[in-house]
Image: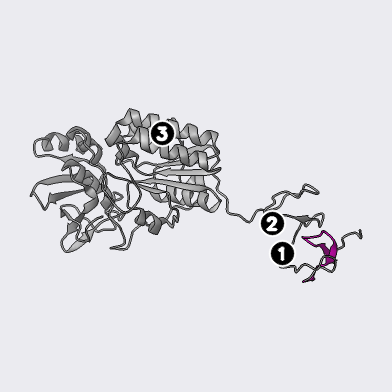
Amino acid sequence: MSPETSETTKCPYCGKNIPKDSTICSSCGKELFEEVFLCPKCNEEVGELDEVCPHCGARFASSKPTSFLETGGSYIAEDENLAYRLFKDLLDAGFAGLCLTKSNPRKIRKRYNVNIDEIYWLTSTLTKEKTLDPQRLEFEMTYIIGEFVKNNSKPAIILDAIGLLITANGFEKVIDFVKGVVDMVSVNNGVFIVHVSPIVLSKKEIETLKQYLEVIDYKKAGISEPESMEEEEGEELAEPEETRKESFELIMQKFRLLSSEAEKEETTKKKKVVEEMSIRVKVRDAETGASLDMELEPDNTIDEIIESVGTYWEKNIGVYVLRKGKRILRGETKVEEADIRDGDLMELIPDPEGGI
């Protein structure tokens, strides 16, 4: 057999040396439609997906997207956009994706460009999308995750509804659930990402979660934090959630809701802790006429306001929006971006678009 030279290559069918620009092998007569890949060091033929030359051991630079998250790792992110960006990086790097969300899957696919089938809406509301009852944590949800991890060599899982699960099942059960998923991805080369909102979970709850999940932020991820996450009006799709049945005292702690009975005492406390930039507004239930005073920060979102008052009034928050004058407010738009000012009155109304 004549040695291969810089002017020849091997036929992928018979292995004979042929001129590199050949369209038909002179030895076996096969038409050469497939591209032949050669090691740049030893000039031997290698597979298209090979990362190491089987002949000389040279390593090739991979053109396939990668993620800096380590396989077997579990992470916690307080920024939802960062959590989904990292999840999308995993999908682009060849991971199979499973999404457990409090939001309409159409919204997740549109906002984050997550084009996967395995998106489960955690709601008891019947829809055309795949859904999971958040109260079936120990059975159905755990089973689906287990089957997904078992049937995929590189599983990536994201959960953005941990507050909803805590409401439905209690904090201790959710911690046990998280520990179980952490163990599953650890032994199956997977990645688990949990998004938590500091306005929904207490500091103590978040610190407990951090015992099992590695904290990830924009700086650690090596990603520039976006200056503004404002959404165009009308782009949000409603995201129904189960009602968070919490004590009134906990609601006040997390969302700074003030009742007429507790207003004097709460105001005294707030003088010591509320920042100068806090904004006090009133939110009225358009259906009952009830109202609540709220202390907001400029970076609070409309979704968080709807979640807090909707939870307090025990409403299906997925079918409600805020109205300020003639404007309809919804989604991840921040208080300062929505031009909400001290003393403003807003109304919680049924979504004119129907919500679900």
Which residue is rendered at x = 77% and y = 48% of the image?
54
Pointer 2 with pointer 1, Cβ within 8 A = yes
Kindly identify the residue that appears in the image at 37 percent across and 44 percent down: 160
Q: Position of residue 222 (x, y in %)?
A: 52, 49
- Could you tell which of marks 3 and 1 lies nearer the N-terminus? 1
Q: CA distance from mark 2 to mark 1?
A: 9 Å
Three-letter code for the amino acid on which mark 3 is drawn: Val
Q: Amino acid at mark 2?
A: Glu
Instruction: Judge the density around disc 3: few (<14), some (14-19), many (≥20) Cα neighbours within 10 Å.
Output: many
Q: Which mark is residue 35?
A: 1
Q: Is residue 112 something one can see in this rendering?
A: yes
Q: CA distance from mark 3 to mark 1?
A: 46 Å
Name the image quarter holding residue 178.
Answer: top left
Of labels 2 and 1, earlier in sequence is: 1
Identify the main secondary structure in magenta: loop
| Marks 2 and 3 close (CB-CB < 8 Å) | no
Mark nearest the camera among 2 and 3 is 2
Mark 1: which amino acid? Glu
**Kind of element beneath mark 1:** loop
Q: What residue range appears in magenta?
A: 8-23
Q: Which mark is residue 178?
A: 3
Location of mark 2 (residue): 48
Q: Nearer the viewer, residue 317 or 3?
A: 3
Position of 320 with respect to 176 (left or right) is left
